Amino acid sequence: MPAPSSALRIALLGCGVVGTQVVRLLTEQAEDLAARVGAPLELVGVAVRDVDAPRDEVVPRALLTTDAADLVTRADIVVELMGGIEPARGLLLRAIEHGASVVTANKALLAQHGPELYQAADAAGVDVYFEAAVAGAIPLVRPLRESLAGDRVRRVLGIVNGTTNYILDEMTTKGLAFDDVLRTAQELGYAEADPTADVEGHDAAAKAAIIASLAFHTRVTLDDVACEGITKVSADDVAWATATGHVIKLLAIAELTDDGVAVRVHPSLVPATHPLATVGGAFNAVFVEAEAAGELMFYGRGAGGAPTASAVVGDVVSVARHRVLGGKGPDESRYADLPLAAADSAVTRYQIRVLVDDRPGVLARVAGVVAERDVSIAAMRQQGETADGGARLVLTTHSAPEAALAATVEAVRALDVVKEVTSVLRVEGA
Amino acid sequence: MPAPSSALRIALLGCGVVGTQVVRLLTEQAEDLAARVGAPLELVGVAVRDVDAPRDEVVPRALLTTDAADLVTRADIVVELMGGIEPARGLLLRAIEHGASVVTANKALLAQHGPELYQAADAAGVDVYFEAAVAGAIPLVRPLRESLAGDRVRRVLGIVNGTTNYILDEMTTKGLAFDDVLRTAQELGYAEADPTADVEGHDAAAKAAIIASLAFHTRVTLDDVACEGITKVSADDVAWATATGHVIKLLAIAELTDDGVAVRVHPSLVPATHPLATVGGAFNAVFVEAEAAGELMFYGRGAGGAPTASAVVGDVVSVARHRVLGGKGPDESRYADLPLAAADSAVTRYQIRVLVDDRPGVLARVAGVVAERDVSIAAMRQQGETADGGARLVLTTHSAPEAALAATVEAVRALDVVKEVTSVLRVEGA
């Protein structure tokens, strides 16, 4: 056992909801943390924009500073909770340059500049830890990076955005339309005033990039993620999903295809019997398919001050322990560097719902254009008739490349007997 | 980055289903593993009872030996997959004494002699890793030990035995009796010829001891676990559970009570809406309640050759990386040493079903003896009448100490109006 070390200096960048909870945990659990690390953790400064802003009394006023650039040079571990790209990126690079290890919950930064940070940290012999950036309190980084180090991950399906999961849940249980649920969610504070990042899938896409990097030891950035949000999901889609034993979930998907790593975010039909189907409300879950381990799932709170702070402080302990032992954690720069597959090479299944003329031969014509694109039909059925003499058809395909499926939808849409393509949803986890 | 190291010598003790899969992973993934570790992993020997027994061709015959005591002295990492207490215990202590790190999947050994092994390893500056011993392929050790290092675990509820989970599942979906399902499970190879360890909860109890040690940084051994199996669960219990929106699961429970750490294994009524309720068949899941992180769940395959091997090789990689970096992992000897609570101090809720005389005043008398033990009643209802003029009562309590609840059951049983206490089940996760 190493001799008890002198205190490790912790600097905090940003002190909002999560930062306040981090200060609380560092204070309240000080004794336990010191025992686990092998040295006390000493908070040496908290960088904020306005030292006079009102804040929780757990945050020592004497430690507040606006000079983050100075603070990062006098810490052993820098915890970044500012969010956004700059000045976070510059400050963390500066911290690393000065020999500090780094803990961050900043998914946007990692999704865009992760490799730069990992490389700098590797060169400096320090750690970059980021458990809180992926799925809040859910331990995911260590399982993917360490527990599965002897295995080969095939596919990751994640519910990684609580806001959209809540909205889809409410649409399902209450039969409401997207706009109505969004409005209520905003009133309740479950959705932002500007909900774009959530409902258009951008937040999930950033997390998908980080998850894919971890799962496949490959550089994946936000630009590599094909992304579609939930704004086009209709109450009718949800009702039909329920009627056919499915739920609609916004999934972040990272998988190994014949062409390399494919990463995408889109609303998906998930069988009601799948473990992801029962993940409700603000919860997150990440489902992993590995060659030897089989199916794994990690479930928990994906956001919130205390849960996120728990993940941050867990990282602080790991990083601190490495410093006490004189080492660093697993090396992020050992990338397998698998090729990234084009988004349209992903293999998936479509459920296409169309409004057609109700006359003989329509089914055959629709089936014909599908077959021409080498897509095979798993099921085709009539959903009912419309008032004006049209019919609704529901067509579910077998697995096929995204490109072929997209072309199929266009071909179906172009048929003169087709009045409208009502809905196109991918089927996952079946 | 450290300079590429010379090969790390791996010794395998035992070569059954899991051992064979470990050899396969070490062989097939050799290149990836070397990259992740920073040095090649070289299998130097496989200790078996009979070198001439038939085995998979992936196991190199030239490496087979019956001299395990010699083998453990010429390895950097010893992987123990023999099971049982001796000679496994002696061999691992000998390996540690000779400076080897140890990976084991042996839950019985850890549940009884874990502290001895951790202490020896700590003194020798080597690692003992055991992810596969707790819940097969489910990453649990690192999340509990590292990710939650800055948090405080309150409670762990685990489905950690696939055989009993399968049996309860079959009883639920098919309405069959325990004996009938067990017989079929044995025929299908899902249950052992001697199913005692599984159905009496002993296997789950060993895992509960390991989980409790991890979650509360406290020495817990098998003897500290209060254990009740599923042999008394009737088809009627299952049917009633279903009718009232519950499922029956064999839960391993470790929790922090006012008196310390309480660890128990017993069949439990779990609300159908709880994440554990949908964990079916041979799957395992561990549900964790932590102060800051909130609710977390880890799900996956709890047994099987390939899943267990995945966890073992993940541990080998971690341990190997520590050796390349010249360190060791988190220190198992830093126990918080919380007191162990008496089994009957655990706080839980009971559902008691009784057969009573159907005459005025019976309900009041039953309610009376419950109240006398300071137990409050959450619900009391009549389940129906019997042919001979008796009535069935179902009584659900609020949370109360196990001792008070047990005394309540005895007092109810002693009432002259009570013909029979049909069933006593604890309610968890509600």
Image: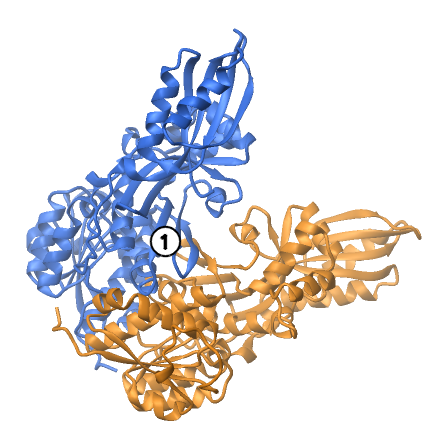
Chain colours: A blue, B orange
**Element class at badge 1:** loop
Note whether A37 is above or below B251 in the view shown: below
Q: Can you see residue B62?
A: yes
A284 relative position to B206: left or right: left
Count of numbered circles in the view: 1
Residue A306: % across, % down: 35, 51
Q: Chain of mark 1?
A: A
In percent of the image, x 64 and y 49: which residue is there? B246
In the figure, A86 relative to B389: above or below?
Answer: above
Q: Is residue A82 left or right of residue B404?
A: left
B195 with respect to A177 (left or right) = right
Taking B359 as reference, is B346 left or right?
left
- Return the residue at label 1: A138
* Image spot of residue B127 (x, y percent): 31, 79
Q: Nearer the viewer, residue A329 or B315?
A: B315
Q: Residue at x 21, y 82 (%)?
A: A3
Quarter location, residue B94: bottom left
Question: Residue B39 falls in which quadrant of the image?
Answer: bottom left
Q: Quadrant of the N terminus of chain B?
A: bottom left
Percent position (x, y) of residue B262? 53, 70
Residue B149 visible in the picture: no
Place of residue B67 in the rendered image (x, y in percent of width and height, measured from the top left): 40, 92
Amino acid under disc 1:
Ile
Residue B350 or residue B277, whichever sits in front? B277
Badge 1 crowding class, 10 Å Cα cut-off, few under 14, some 14 to 19, many 20 or more, is many
Q: Residue at point 76% right, 67% down? A: B410
